[in-house]
Image (cartoon, rainbow, N blue to C red):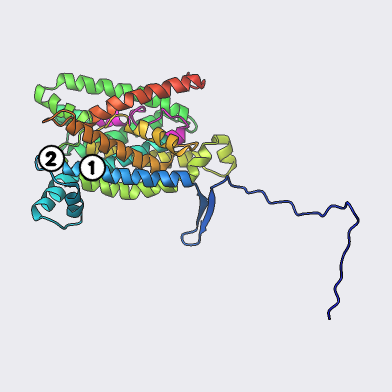
């Protein structure tokens, strides 16, 4: 038999309970921490699901595009041919003739989307994209000068577009520098440089002969026709380096969203981060433009579409890239099937679809009191 002690409380007394610990995260969010590599963060279910849906949609459009051509191929046969199995003739058509075009569209769309997300997050402005601050226009001017004036120096269209975009970015950064740079100055200077490059391109087009002008125009509108492995490999290598860099810069970009003063107070080297983001975004847009031409409005629209689908305060990097790939591949499918017997440049389709999005962003900015 064991003794037991019973504690009695006066009638009406209240038993103290420990205060519940409030959850620091919103409902449905999960924190994670990895030991190798040492990474921690917050898992947001909606963006993850969105990326999965966009990835599936991108894969389906990618394979669907490979079925279209003078020699129609069934969807299931395309999937088998990508794995190297099936009819040898089908494998040859898919892997050697059609796959480079589809890969350029996939990789260029991803680069456009990620680059636009970097610029819009860095400047805290939804209108800031390589289309608006002159980078694609600078690449176009360099290519047209090489075609019309013969100033290519033995370089191809890809190299000229890459050098033009890099030179334009350097010019914008130097002109925007005044004891540092701000997103606002980068946008204003970029718009001015964009118009200068566009005017120079128009002059060169008028100066050149008919055949040179036609060749330049075919590249300026953004085109995936006739793409080969020569355009695909450099773009793939560039994205293999620049995409991980963009993801690593994501945490630092979040602090820039709070403003330069707060970001500096949190220990962020604002100017160094801004320069790193600028170089990464320029590299992405330069290689994509060199491979596919300046496909209009993808870098502007894709991050905004992804941001609204993910319901985040800034354009999500991965979702923006997948959205850009989806837009380019979908636009290419429309361009190839809209007019029977004619393959329109993909830039025409994205320009028609992207112009209303630009107008909507301008109207929304004015209603919010931030449009000037």
- Residue where numbered disc 1 is placed: 104
| Magenta highlight range | 120-141
Magenta stretch encompasses residue 133: yes
Query: Is any atom of residue 230 visible in this view?
Result: no
Residue 135 point in image, percent of width and height? 32, 31
Under circle 1, the secondary element is: helix
Q: Nearer the viewer, residue 174 or 156?
A: 156
In which quadrant will I find the N terminus?
Answer: bottom right
Residue located at (52% from left, 51% from top): 41
Q: Is residue 173 left or right of residue 15?
A: left
Q: Is residue 305 left or right of residue 266?
A: left
* Image quadrant in which you'd find residue 334: top left
- Residue where numbered disc 2 is placed: 69
Query: Is the residue marked by circle 1 packed among few (<14), some (14-19), or many (20+) residues within 10 Å?
Result: many
Residue located at (15% from left, 19% from top): 207
Residue located at (10% from left, 22% from top): 210
Residue 304 point in image, percent of width and height? 41, 33
């Amino acid at each position: 038999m064991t003794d037991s002690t019973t504690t009695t409380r006066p009638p009406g007394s209240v038993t103290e309970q420990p205060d519940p610990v409030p959850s620091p995260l919103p409902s449905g969010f999960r924190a994670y921490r990895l030991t190798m590599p040492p990474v921690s963060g917050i898992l947001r279910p909606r963006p993850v699901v969105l990326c999965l849906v966009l990835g599936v949609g991108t894969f389906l459009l990618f394979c669907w595009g490979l079925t279209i051509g003078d020699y129609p191929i069934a969807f299931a046969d395309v999937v088998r041919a990508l794995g190297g199995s099936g009819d040898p003739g089908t494998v040859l058509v898919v892997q050697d003739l059609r796959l480079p075009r589809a890969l350029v569209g996939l990789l260029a769309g991803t680069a456009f989307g990620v680059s636009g997300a970097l610029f819009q997050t860095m400047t805290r402005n939804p209108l800031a994209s390589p289309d608006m601050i002159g980078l694609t226009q600078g690449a176009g001017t360099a290519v047209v000068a090489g075609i019309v004036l013969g100033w290519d120096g033995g370089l191809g269209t890809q190299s000229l577009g890459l050098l033009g975009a890099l030179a334009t970015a350097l010019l914008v950064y130097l002109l925007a520098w005044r004891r540092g740079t701000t997103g606002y100055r980068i946008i204003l200077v970029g718009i001015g440089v964009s118009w200068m490059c566009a005017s120079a391109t128009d002059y060169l087009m008028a100066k050149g002969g008919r055949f040179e002008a036609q060749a330049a125009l075919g590249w300026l509108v953004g085109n995936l026709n006739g793409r080969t492995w020569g355009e695909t490999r450099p773009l793939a290598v560039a994205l293999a380096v620049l995409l991980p860099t963009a993801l690593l810069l994501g945490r630092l970009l979040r602090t820039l969203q709070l403003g330069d003063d707060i970001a500096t107070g949190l220990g962020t080297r604002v100017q160094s981060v801004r320069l790193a983001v600028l170089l990464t975004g320029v590299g992405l847009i330069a290689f994509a433009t060199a491979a596919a031409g300046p496909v209009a409005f993808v870098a502007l629209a894709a991050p905004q579409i992804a941001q609204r689908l993910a319901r985040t305060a800034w354009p999500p990097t991965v979702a923006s890239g997948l959205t850009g790939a989806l837009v380019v591949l979908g636009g290419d499918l429309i361009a190839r099937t809209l007019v029977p017997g004619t393959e329109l440049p993909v830039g025409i389709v994205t320009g028609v679809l992207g112009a209303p999005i630009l107008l909507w962003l301008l109207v929304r900015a004015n209603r919010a009191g931030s449009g000037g």
